[in-house]
C-alpha cells in the first residue's frame, strides 16, 4: 500500500505540473484528482505505521529511558531539593528572568517618584 500511495502521489503531481505548465486543463484536473485521492491514502498509511510498535522497538525505548535515568542520577540532575509542601510558601523570593511575565505580579510597591 505505501508504494501504491506514493506512486499515485508522484503520478498525480507529475500530471498536474505538466498540465499546469502546458496549459492543459484536462491533464491538470486529472493530476489534481489523483493527488487528492493519494493524499488520504498516504496519511492513513503513515498513521498506521506510527501506531505499530514491535516488541523489539518497545524494549529499545525502555532500555534507552533506563540508561537516560541512570545518566541523570550519575550527573546529579535528580538530586534537586524537594519543593515546599503545598500551602506553605517559602519566605525567599526568587528572581524572575527578564522575559517572564508573571501571572501574579509581586505586591511589593516601589516608592513613588515625585517631581520637585
Image: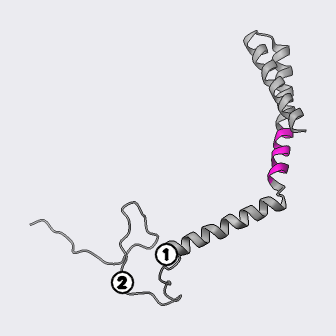
Which residue is at a point 78% across and 59% down the rendered structure image?
57
Q: Is residue 83 above or below residue 46?
A: below
Neighbours of disc 1 within 10 Å: few (<14), some (14-19), many (20+): few
Q: Is residue 57 left or right of residue 4?
A: left
Residue 19: image tag: none
The question of residue 44 being in magenta is answered with: yes
Residue 92: image tag: 2
Q: Is residue 41 left or right of residue 22?
A: right
Q: Is residue 106 left or right of residue 2?
A: left
Foreground pick, 79 / 37: 79
Q: Is residue 22 above or below residue 9?
A: above
Which residue is at a point 81% across and 43% down the rendered structure image?
43
Q: Which corner quadrant of the image does residue 16 belong to?
A: top right
Q: Is residue 91 above or below residue 114?
A: below
Give percent across and percent down for residue 8.
86, 29
The residue labelled by disc 1 is 76
Amino acid at each position: 500500500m505505501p508504494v501504491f500511495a506514493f506512486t499515485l502521489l508522484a503520478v498525480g503531481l507529475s500530471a498536474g505540473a505538466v498540465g499546469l505548465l502546458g496549459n492543459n486543463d484536462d491533464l491538470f484536473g486529472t493530476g489534481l484528482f489523483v493527488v487528492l485521492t493519494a493524499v488520504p491514502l498516504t496519511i492513513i498509511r503513515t498513521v498506521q505505521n506510527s501506531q505499530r510498535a514491535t516488541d523489539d522497538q518497545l524494549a529499545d525505548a525502555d532500555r534507552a529511558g533506563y540508561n537516560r535515568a541512570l545518566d541523570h542520577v550519575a550527573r546529579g540532575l535528580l538530586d534537586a531539593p524537594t519543593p515546599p509542601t503545598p500551602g506553605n510558601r517559602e519566605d525567599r523570593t526568587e528572581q524572575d528572568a527578564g522575559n517572564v511575565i508573571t501571572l501574579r505580579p509581586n505586591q511589593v510597591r516601589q516608592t513613588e517618584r515625585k517631581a520637585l
